[in-house]
Amino acid sequence: MVRILETERITKAFGNMFAVNRFDLHVEEGKLKSIIGPNGAGKTTLFNVISGKIRPTMGRVKFKGEDITNLSPNSISRRGLARSFQITNIFPNLTVFENVRLAVQQRDKKRSSYFTPVSSLSETNRKAKEILNQIGLIEYQDSVARNLSYGDQRHLEIGITLAMEPDLLMLDEPTSGMSSMETQATVRLIDKLTENLTILLIEHKMDVVMSVSDTVLVMHYGQKIAEGTPKEVEKDPRVREAYLGGL
Amino acid sequence: MSLKLPRLLRGPESGYYWFLLFLFLVALLPLGVTAKIYSTFYLRFGTELLILGLFALSVDIIMGYTGLVSLGPAAFFGIGAYAGALTLLKLANSIWLALAITLVLSWMVAWLIGYLSIRIKGVYFAMLTLAFAEMFHELAFNWQSFTGGSDGLTGVPRPEIGIPPFVLSLGNPYVFFYFVLVVVILVYYGCVRLVNSPFGHVLQAIRDNEERAEFIGYDVRIFKRRSFVISGIIGGLSGSLFALLRFVDPDAFHWFISAEVLVMNLFGGMGTLYGPIIGAIIFLFSKDLISSYTEHWRLILGVIFVGFVIYSPRGIVGLYEDFRDKAIPAVLATLRRSGIREARKTAQSLVADANPVVERESSSKLKGDLPVRETEAGIEDKE
Ligand SMILES: Nc1ncnc2c1ncn2[C@@H]1O[C@H](COP(=O)(O)OP(=O)(O)OP(=O)(O)O)[C@@H](O)[C@H]1O
Ligand SMILES: [Mg+2]
């Protein structure tokens, strides 16, 4: 199976605390892998290293066979890696449509043209509408993003990442803070996405993890303590211990 | 009443084009002089308003649209002023050469300052831009033989434009006024195109959320630098025109200049292109008016400024937009439904309610609150 993402002994130390410790991760093309683990396990830090937000203390990241360890976030993103954030990260004062269009526009050959009106990028505008339909926000396309409900803002962020047409989609707790209704909608959306996307997912809600994942990886104190199918992981005694001890 | 406006003058972007129309009307200003309603002093004053409006516009690109607060726009104003004047004095008496050298020089200086300072964020960026402007101020003061030191440059010739036998002198206030007006219209229209282009939209994305822009694949630093350069070039152009209208001395680089142009932007309303130009016009008018009564004009303008920042952070344009989008539709809707008495009450409550916009926007956080059409907003959810 093709490994689209591979990390080698990723380590990130904050002072003398190892948030991520010699971490080996691999994601296979077309699969959905979830990362679970107690608060402070280092999941977000791992995402930050992979996506270029922070530099690792040690180790390297390979994406589609290329070493991307020291690249900037924008060049990593352009290589086909899209991520969402644990704390909603959208353009709050732009319209919903504009939020998505900006992400689509990045792939347009006129992405930074100075004098063409954006309204004339018909392919980009069409794709942006398509994404809004897909995430169910088309009726709010002209609303300013910050006026959306919390759940819809989270969906909008997923929409932004989809608009990038990524080869790997990394979602950091997409359902955090959502009501159970909103969570269900998110799960349905992710389920649809798994048909043709590779996804790396951080998630706390066990029912979500168990229903959408191909593989589950458990992280604890910056290290991997278990990895396997949802069933295998559920039974693993070390996982139970980490969760009971860690919460 | 089915008078239909052209497409550009309707819809959310219409403000840009209404102002363009206004600029065309400004072409009528000299008629007042011909008709002896006011003297040529006002023609020159009008020219100065346009030039400083252009300067304010340049700052809007970097501050209003990109979200970078630079404290050193005077650097470009001064570079332009000296580049223009020195070309005319020492190289050739040609406006085109003067402007070309201005543009190239401000482009280079802006690129360099941008390259060095944009990598640094927030307050440090602002301080660095201020420091560069101050360095130029010092240089203009001390390089006596080239810049004329504290006296500045005098006797700058007024070049001619046109092809013989149709030649006009820019020393003629009418000619210079129209020359500046054409430049302002062209640059303003270019900026309208720019902010509506893919590039301009990325700038606005950066202003709103730099990290998100970076993580969808835009090299934020490059976009900011380009915006800084565009802003610097326009700023240089305005300085050059100013030198032709008035004079050049090291004060062109003074931090007062930077501060005033920021105030013009805040007064008028940044991020609109026309707001800052309107801000420049009102600022200079008030300065002129108030300083004819008292020498403490800074004190009075300062108080007005503080009032604006606190009560209408979106400036005069913001004030007008609230009026147009909220107050007028609300009063009209009440009028339609319940007659004049109710409408007056609505109007009064709107006046009492200092800032209706902010409240309404935060109250519609929940889904189920469908985006209301603009004209209907304000009245339905009041009950
Ligand atoms: N920028 C930082 N500076 C210092 N310490 C940090 C920084 N970022 C994270 N940490 C620390 O690293 C550890 C791992 O944090 P991280 O956010 O990666 O955990 P997480 O697994 O995502 O947790 P959660 O489930 O709460 O989101 C925590 O102890 C955190 O306090
Ligand atoms: Mg986290």
Image: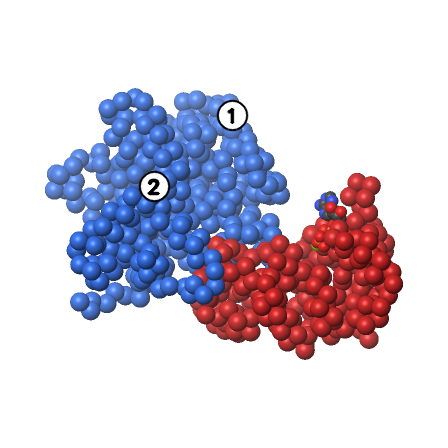
Chain colours: A red, B blue
Q: Is residue B147 left or right of residue A4?
A: left
Name which residue type carries label 2: Gly
In the image shown, does A224 or B36 lie closer to the viewer?
Answer: A224
Sequence-wise first label, 2 or 1: 1
Counting labels gives: 2
Q: Which mark is residue B138?
A: 1
Which quadrant would the C terminus of chain B be assigned to in this image?
bottom left
The correct choice, above or below, for B152 with respect to B379 in the image is above
Residue A163 is situated, as x and y percent measured from the top left of the image, at 58, 68
Q: Does residue B97 appear in the picture of this structure? A: no
Q: Is residue B233 left or right of residue B300?
A: right
Which quadrant would the N terminus of chain B be assigned to in this image?
bottom left
Chain of the residue on which disc 1 is drawn: B
**Mark-to-mark CA distance, 2 and 1:** 29 Å
Q: Which mark is residue B279?
A: 2
Residue at screen point 27% across, 30% down: B288
Quadrant of ligand 2 in image: bottom right
Residue B162 is situated, as x and y percent measured from the top left of the image, at 30, 49
Residue B47 position by quadrant: top left
Residue at screen point 86% across, 54% down: A22
Give the structural element (helix, strand or loop) at label 1: helix
Residue A170 position by quadrant: bottom right
